[in-house]
């Protein structure tokens, strides 16, 4: 990372990782102050546009707004709701609800698995903060849509259609990506609020089959596993967004860690907790994990240390580790605190009014597709704020 940031980074590291309560609270409060200003500017631009724009990233110095069906459409509404949780300011609740309700039609989306991400981050958070019954209905409808993608023979939710988009040329039959672990939270939630255990059973089946097939002996994971949905079994293992089929794409490892932590929360089955800890072991013992704990975009990228970092992977890992620490021990929290300290430093955190009003710089969407390389991403910001809500909650006691 750039040398002129080193001095400032050291100051932030000192204020974000020291162990006294006052100093750690300061770190959270400092980030809340910053996010309040930065996202305040973002929300103001959107409000002044007279429509509900949904920001995802920046391309050629221009902010990119997305449609409701984009896999990342739930993150900006969710970010507003997390700001409400962090500040208690009703302005954020108002924006969060308004941008969430714009996504209403997504509950019928069956063309890809990301309905889980979209609805859980928007309506899931809206339900958590308001307990409004009408959001329950959306969560249940969305889970029904997601469950149309469950393939009983391999026992997984199919991520992408085999005959659509860029993956339509691959000859896959039932591609499942590790990211899909993140869609299970919607299914668990739908069972909780409806009392219908069908969704939960699908989630558990998906988690178990993924555990069986997606992971290598060292607990790193493949990005894509293609299943035979007629005979069952695995047809092949690949990457889509990683460096190579056999490499460990950083955000994929982050999704896996987060996903199995959620599975433990929802089932209390120790096998998921143990598995999350094994994934943690791979990530944190990796020789290519940098000292500031913000991973390169792929742990096996060929030109490390001259490869882009992925702040989004770091934010997801930090958020997962705060939750994991609440089930196990404080060492996970210490690592999460170090990540948050790094992300809070000027090496990754934007200056107010820059970065098109996104919070974090230096994330990666997909290098193999030539998309979103070293840019801000709405999901990096979402998981950064989620991590801060979890840190704040843990430190309350
Ligand atoms: N789910 C897509 C990604 O992580 O880029």
Image: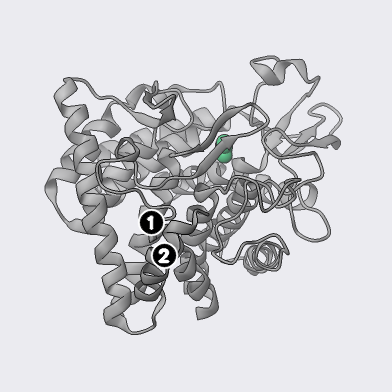
Above or below, comparing residue 159 to residue 15 in the picture:
above
For residue 136, say whether it is visible.
no
Helix, strand, or loop for circle 1?
Answer: loop
Q: Residue at x 35, y 54 (%)?
A: 385
How is the model colour-coded? one colour
Mark 2 CB near ligand 1 (8 Å cut) = no
For the point 36% across and 73% down, the residue is: 394
Numbered badge on residue 346: 1
Seen in the picture, residue 348 relative to 374 is either above or below; the reply is below
Residue 269 lies, with reference to residue 367, above or below; the image says below
Q: Is residue 62 left or right of residue 98?
A: right
Drawn side of residue 199 relative to residue 172, left or right: left
Can residue 75 be seen? yes
- Where does the image place residue 44, in percent across and percent down from the top left? 16, 33
How many neighbours does mark 2 have within 10 angstroms: few (below 14), some (14-19), or many (20 or more)? Answer: many
Tell me the residue that label 2 is attached to.
Answer: 9
């Amino acid at each position: 990372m750039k040398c002129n940031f080193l001095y400032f980074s050291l100051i932030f590291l000192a204020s974000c990782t020291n162990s006294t309560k006052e100093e750690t609270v300061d770190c959270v409060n400092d980030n809340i102050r910053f996010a309040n200003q930065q996202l305040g500017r973002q929300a103001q631009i959107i409000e002044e546009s007279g429509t509900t724009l949904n920001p995802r990233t920046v391309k050629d110095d221009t902010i990119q707004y997305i449609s409701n069906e984009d896999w990342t459409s739930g993150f900006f509404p969710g970010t507003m709701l997390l700001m409400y949780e962090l500040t208690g300011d009703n302005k954020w609740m108002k924006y969060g609800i308004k941008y969430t309700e714009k996504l209403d039609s997504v509950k019928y989306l069956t063309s890809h698995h990301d309905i889980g991400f979209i609805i859980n981050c928007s309506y899931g958070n809206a339900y958590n903060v308001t307990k409004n019954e009408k959001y329950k209905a959306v969560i249940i409808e969305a889970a029904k849509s997601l469950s149309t993608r469950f393939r009983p023979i391999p026992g997984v939710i199919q991520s992408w259609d085999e005959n659509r988009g860029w993956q339509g040329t691959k000859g896959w039959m039932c591609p499942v990506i590790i990211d899909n672990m993140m869609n299970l939270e919607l299914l668990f939630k739908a069972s909780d609020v409806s009392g219908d255990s069908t969704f939960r059973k699908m989630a558990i089946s998906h988690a178990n089959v993924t555990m069986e097939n997606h992971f290598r002996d060292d607990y790193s994971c493949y990005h894509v596993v293609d299943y035979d949905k007629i005979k069952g079994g695995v047809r092949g293992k690949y990457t889509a967004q990683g460096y190579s089929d056999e490499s460990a794409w950083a955000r994929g490892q982050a999704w896996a860690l987060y996903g199995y932590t959620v599975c433990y929360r929802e089932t209390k089955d120790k096998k998921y907790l143990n598995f999350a800890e094994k994934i943690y072991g791979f990530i944190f013992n990796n020789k290519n994990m940098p000292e500031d704990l913000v991973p390169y975009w792929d742990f096996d990228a060929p030109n490390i240390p001259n490869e882009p970092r992925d702040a989004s992977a770091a934010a997801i890992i930090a958020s997962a580790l705060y939750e994991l620490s609440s089930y196990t021990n404080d060492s996970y929290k210490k690592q999460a605190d170090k990540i948050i300290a790094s992300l809070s430093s000027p090496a990754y955190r934007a200056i107010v009014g820059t970065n098109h009003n996104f919070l974090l710089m230096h994330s990666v969407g997909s290098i193999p597709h030539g998309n979103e390389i070293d840019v801000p991403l709405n999901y990096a910001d979402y998981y950064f704020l989620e991590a801060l809500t979890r840190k704040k909650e843990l430190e309350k006691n």
